[in-house]
Every structure is written in C-alpha cells, then in structure tokens.
Image (cartoon, rainbow, N blue to C red):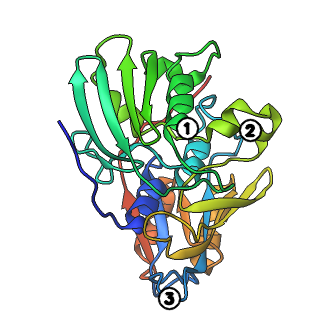
Amino acid sequence: MRSSSGDRKWPARFLAIIAAVALLVAACTEDGGETDAVDAGEEGPSGSVRFLIAENFWADWEPYQSTAQSQARLEEQIYDYLVDFPTGDLSAPEPSLASSWEQIEDTTWEFELQEGVTFHEGQDFTSADVKASIELASGATKTEVVTAQNWVPTTVEVIDELTVRLVTEKPFAPLLAQLGDTPIVSAEWLEGDQTRLKAEPNGTGPFKLVSDTRARKTMEANLDYWREPPRIRELIWEFVQDPQTRLNALVSGQADAIDRVPPEHIETIEGNPNLELSSVTGIESVNL
C-alpha cells in the first residue's frame, strides 16, 4: 500500500489534541471568549489561547519515557510524526513527515520523507532523525524506554537522506498506528547532552516552547513551519486542579478551553450561549 502526500488544515490538529484524552471538554465560542485566532495570512498568526488542564505536568521532556497524557498533549504541538490520523480512523493514515510509504515485505516498510523540513533549533530533518527516533522508541537499542511496550524492536536502514526502510523484528500490524504516536526527535538531541534532552524539546512541529514552569507551558507559533502556519500566535497550557476554578475562568473569559468537566458543571456550560461542550470517548490510565 502506498499513500501520497496531501494538504491538511492545521486547526484540525489542535482541536483533536483538545479532545484526545478528556472525556468532556468545554471551550469558548468565537463570540464568547477573548481568543483572537484568525486565518494566518500575510500578517501571520495572531491571538492567544489559554487551555486549563486537569492533569499536572509531572514528566520532563525526555522522549519515549513517559505515560503522562498532559505531556503527550504538549508533544503533539512541538513534534511531528511520520504519519497522521486527523480523523481518528486508524485505517486511514495520512502523510506527515513521511510523504509516502510502501510495504516491501511482511516485516519491511519503505518511507519517503518530506524535503525542506527543519527542527526548531535549525537542523535539517533527514533519515538520521528517523533512525535515531524509531530505534530508540521501539526498544531496538540498549536504552530501556517506556514506549517499547507498545512496539516490537524496529531497526531503520538509511537508503539516502530522505528514504528509510523500517524492519520490524516480526510482522507488526499496528506499525502505522504506532508511527502516528511516536514523535520524531532530532538525532543530534537524542545523541547529545542528556540534560538538554530532558529540558529543551527540539521538534519540527507548529509550535515552539518558549516558557516552561511547573504549572504553565507557553508556546509560540513556528513561523518557519513546513506546512500551513498555525493560526494562533501563542498557546498557553496551564495546570489548574480544581474543576470549579477551571469553570469560573472559562465563564469569565480568562480561559479559552478546559477539560475533564464534572457532571455537575454540564448544565451550566450547556446553558451558556458563549460556551461549547464536546464529549468524546477516551482512554485514561490510573495508577494506584
């Protein structure tokens, strides 16, 4: 099977991230909040979005070593993936950093990569980054990682700077789905200073991290993004544990989106014409 490159609007990605984990998400409508996210034209992205989330930011930026859902949300904005599933249908992968792919054998897939993509720190995206990322994430190296439990060990053969072959240890049906959940990190970052790796994410995604505190992460639009640029200039993620505080901020316009809405707040949100409630089915891990 081979898939070829196609266009996809960036906002769909952000909205998907908002609803990816939370069972219930509420957000201001265009008329009700202070968000000023407009189409990115000649003037570039504008406005700011503040999203209050219920899970704290307990993980660092070391890739492939965390099960934190809050961290996964952040990574979705900073990193890109070889393939994408914008509709949520795992049978319908679309190109991302991989422009096309083809299954060669039961355990071998060949991927052509996008040209002209750069990381936030200026490095060119090449096959070396795919090799370093996939081999580490899949458990094919000596380094133990959390994500390996969802993979089979997968080695990457570099054909040229923009072509790779992934060889799985055994036939692995969910390969494309796992690629859609595995961020591609700069090989220079993975192989370099491990302190920097844990503190400074370096991806190719639509947003760059510009401020990082224990309870608040601030991102700015990547103006050199290889796809359509983000419509939003600033994206703020903030941990607020109390659901009533999150709701109050949303209703007053101090926040643009909240998640994990408790049942007793649903009536309030549905009764406010300036708010919109989205309900989705999600998967959540709870450690006892």
- Seen in the picture, residue 31 relative to 60 is either above or below; the reply is below
Which residue has dot 2 on it? 197
Residue mark closest to the camera, 1 vs 2: 1
Q: How far apart are marks 1 and 3 (CA)?
A: 32 Å
10 Å crowding of disc 3: few (<14), some (14-19), many (20+): few
Judging from the image, what secondary structure is the residue with disc 3 in? loop
10 Å crowding of disc 2: few (<14), some (14-19), many (20+): many
Residue 137: quadrant of the picture: top right
Residue flagged by tag 3: what amino acid is it? Glu
Q: Is residue 248 left or right of residue 131?
A: right
Judging from the image, what secondary structure is the residue with disc 2 in? helix
Q: In which quarter of the image is the N terminus?
A: top left
Q: Distance between the residues labelled 3 and 2?
A: 34 Å
Q: Residue 54: horizontal and vertical position, in percent?
A: 62, 51
Residue mark closest to the camera, 1 vs 3: 1
Q: Residue 275: horizontal and vertical position, in percent?
A: 45, 75
Residue at 56% x, 72% y: name it: 256
Whichever of callouts 1 and 2 sits on the residue coming sooner in the sequence is 1
Residue at 60% x, 45% y: name it: 70
Residue flagged by tag 2: what amino acid is it? Leu
Q: Is residue 175 left or right of residue 266?
A: left
10 Å crowding of disc 1: few (<14), some (14-19), many (20+): some
Residue at 80% x, 34% y: name it: 193
Can residue 272 be seen?
A: yes
Whichever of callouts 3 and 2 sits on the residue coming sooner in the sequence is 3
Q: Residue 252: horizontal and vertical position, in percent?
A: 62, 79
Which residue has dot 3 on it? 42
Residue flagged by tag 1: what amino acid is it? Asp
Instruction: From the viewer's side, name the closer residue of 7 and 91.
Output: 7
**Mark 1–mark 2 contact, CB under 8 Å?**
no
Which residue has dot 1 on it? 129
Q: In which quarter of the image is the C terminus?
A: top right
